Image (tube, helix red, strand yellow):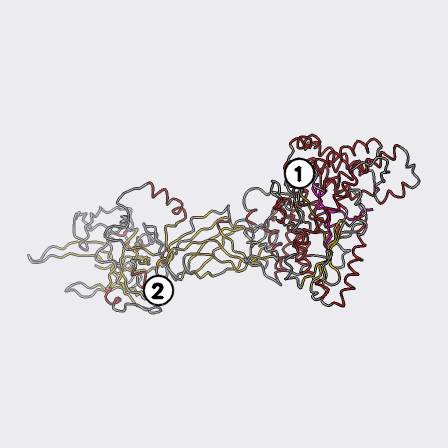
Amino acid sequence: KMSVPDYMQCAEDHQTLLVVVQPIGIVPEESFFRIYKRISAVSQVNVRDSQRVLYIRYRHHYPPENNEWGDFQTHRKVVGLITITDCSSAKDWPQTFEKFHLQKEMYGSTLYDSRLFVFGLQGEIAEQPRTDVAFYPSYDECETVEKRIEDFIESLFIVLESKRLDRATDKSGDKIPLLCVPFEKKDFVGLDTDSRHYKKRCQGRMRKHVGDLCLQAGMLQDSLVHYHMAVELLRSVNDFLWLGAALEGLCSASVIYHYPGGTGGKAGSRRAQGGSLSAEAGNRHRPGKDGICFLFCALTSNGINADTSAEIGRAKNCLSPEDIIDKYKEAISYYGKYKNAGVIELEACVKAVRVLAIQKRSMEASEFLQNAVYINLRQLSEEEKIQRYSILSELYERIGFHRKSAFFKRIAAMQCAAPSIPEPGWRACYKLLLETLPGYSLSLDPKDFSKGTHRGWAAVQMRLLHELVYASRRMGNPALCVRHLSFLLQTMLDFLSDQEKKDVTQSLESYTAKCPGTMEYITLPDGLKLPPVPFTKLPIVRSVKLLNLPTSLRPHKMKSLLGQNVSTKSPFIYSPIIAHSRGEERSKKIDFQWVQGDVCEVQLMVYNPMPFELRVENMGLLTTGVEFESLPAALSLPAESGLYPVTLVGVPQTTGQITINGYHTSVFGVYSDCLLDNLPGVKTNGCTVEVIPALPRLQISTSLPRSAHMLQPSSGDEISTNVSVQLYNGETQQLVIKLENIGTEPLEKLEVTAKTVNTKEKLYGDFLSWKLEDTLSQFPLKPGKIATFTVDIKVKLDFSCQENLLQDLSDDGISVTGLPLSSPFRQVVKPRVETKPVNPQESSKVGDFSHVKTLEAILNFKYSGGPGHVEGYYRNLALGLHVEVEPSVFFTRVSTLPATSFFQCHLLLDVFNSTEHELTISARNNEDLILHAGECQR
């Protein structure tokens, strides 16, 4: 029984002669394969004096039991043996030569010829001329190897041709021997050799055998004729096994005719590129592949016989592409009848699939492959199983069944690490698993999973990724485990159950404890690079917003004489071309500025998709364009948190355009750089902002208490500090303001302006006054230094319109319209109303709250310094002042006395002290008048 299938078999192998190349004794492996490669390069030789081409198939290992099937199909017969040996001394030579003879005996019955190549032996023995032995001083000095092989192949051809002629000439009268396969021999004992049935069987089998020899000898037309005759003879005697072989021979010859480029796929594509080989080309050889070295010539008409009638004859005998497949099906059905022909059946299936792949008939090819899967061979070793599943996978791939191909490749991978293997091959397992990824719509690049709907079956993909993680662990490569687990978590997050999310993250944390996840590419031994896997979903970021500086720190540009909006770049008011081309840039550019050396903020809206608390460590910004010191944050997001604001901060160290490219995180021990370009669903107000040169920072503190009243200026600017003070009407108070430079740049320029807001009151005199020269004399103010600035607050208001505090001027009811009352006030005094209380003290208590008047003002400090000042930038700081003015003295009643002279008149004033304190009133040329709280005197 033939036990070892050759999964690489192709239909065109039927025309090759099988030559085994083997070492004798101890030969260095590298040296052996160097010579083997050179020998196997001579895979196609033109026969001298004819237009026939011989094809050679080389093997460095071939099971002798397979050789016993050589009569059944001659391409399975070892017809040539080449041995290679190391022999450095003459005394070893007899023993070496003896080993050569023993090796020959292993394949003895089938060999046409053999050669021994001896390396290292020099001297008398090496100089003796021999045909079957070649001596070379060393592996480097053996130029004639190829020439020797050509001569050897020619000797094989001579034997082949004589056998062909011997068998082909029908010697009537001679008894034709019955060719058998090994398992038939016992069945034919005692058969009637004279019966017509027996003779037909002998003839049919011999015809088929001659067809094989013709095919090997380069006579395609003859082989077709012989195969057709064999099919008829064998069909008539129901000799099914050999009928199958004859049909397969017919198929092979027809395939060679129709597909001169070969059906072997990758190996075949390097075979002879069409056209015939001329006689002179006999010395040119084509290289083979992986020890299965064969090359095929395009067997065009002139490749065999220039006679056009022969061409027509061949075409008539040749099967059509459709018939080839039908005949393969028939042959395989015959092989299936014989348990011992499993290998033959399996190889025929593989050959048919290769032909169907070229014909692009995938569904039919899959039927043949399905049949091949279920062919039972003997108990296969693990290595043979791996080979079997790998080839099935390769064939499914060739016919476009990618998922089926991946299925078998995964089985092969699992077989590499089967429990029965003493040393499981985890590397081979891992390598095969990687090759299954495309079949399951998986790649190792997370970018392929960031857009659009998920491709492939997530459950299968997760299983495969888990297997990659396990194989990586068994290989002892924790970095690879981390990368695959990160990939699983990032790309399959939506498909993981809550429990699976917990399990995967726990595994990941246990691996990252030994080997943290990085953003480096991981290069595998075969050169494949695994891209990094940033955790863009842990947490998920929904929006990124660059924040302006606080109002008091925002830079302002000094207005130029031309005005800010005049562009000097273009003479045109509007150009649609420029506007259009800059649209993209404009959408990303932001209309505020950041300042070098000041803390800048970016707000992210994030949420945690995990069913447990997510700890994000070391979260910071990724920037380009400006040297930027990112100040990382650590955050803890509750389970399935919903949108959550996170502010990331940093300090630009230089000036220019800064672009926020993304953010970096450390989650579960994996460091990630998440770029905004790779986050399709993120909203942003732009990512590029200008950083202007450094400016000083001013902090103000005052001698007054802070105010609860927040002033809202009309311009919308914010006020950094609000202070309040209570004064009596007519009182003056000094406000001492400390100016501290808390930045790193010197404070060089200061301008102070004041603005009264939110008041309808008429002010008399200067409300706020100061002398800036005293402060500016302390400039430039170095960082950390303090200057003082004094403001005088003086309040003069008109309280005379308070009706409930003013009585009529005269008891007589004299109306003194337009009388100057505490000049420059003018007030129409209304007649007394009887219902009003007469006592002023009582009336003052009635509207106690209403007679406090409020004044509000904003002090603006416009300051600059350092490099920002050179570039024309300044900052604004506003101090809000809230003054509550209480009335002090009222003139409640005015009356006159008759004049005693022409030079003076007498005016009587009733003075009322509305405060809670004792007052002294001074009048010119009068004595001081002391008024107690709430007292009224005339």
| Residue 511 position (above or below residue 198) | below
- Closest to the observer, 194 or 898: 194
| Amino acid at dot 2 | Ser
Question: Quadrant where the C terminus lies?
Answer: bottom left
Q: Is residue 790 visible?
A: yes
Which of the 4 quarters of the picture holds residue 707? Answer: bottom left
The structure residue drawn at horizontal position 23% and vertical position 66%, both measured from the top left corner, is: 773
Q: Amino acid at mark 1?
A: Ile
Which residue does the numbered mark 2 point to in the structure image?
701
Q: Position of residue 73 (x, y in %)?
A: 77, 42
Picture quadrant of residue 781 = bottom left
Between residue 160 and residue 909, name the one nearer to us: 160
Q: Say if the magenta span includes residue 3.
A: yes
Whole-Å distance between the Cαs marked 1 and 2?
108 Å
Residue closest to the far left: 902
Residue 232 magenta-drawn?
no
Mark 1 / mark 2, whichever is N-terminal:
1
Q: In this picture, which residue range is highlighted in magenta?
A: 1-21
Q: Nearer the viewer, residue 32 or 496?
A: 32
Q: Position of residue 722 (x, y in %)?
A: 35, 58
Q: How many marks?
A: 2
In the image, residue 160 lies at what x, y percent? 75, 45
Contact check, label 1 and label 2, Cβ < 8 Å? no
Q: Residue furthest right?
A: 190
- The one nearer the camera, 893 or 883, is 883
Of the two numbered discs 1 and 2 in the rendering, the one whose residue sits closer to the viewer? 1
Residue behind mark 1: 304
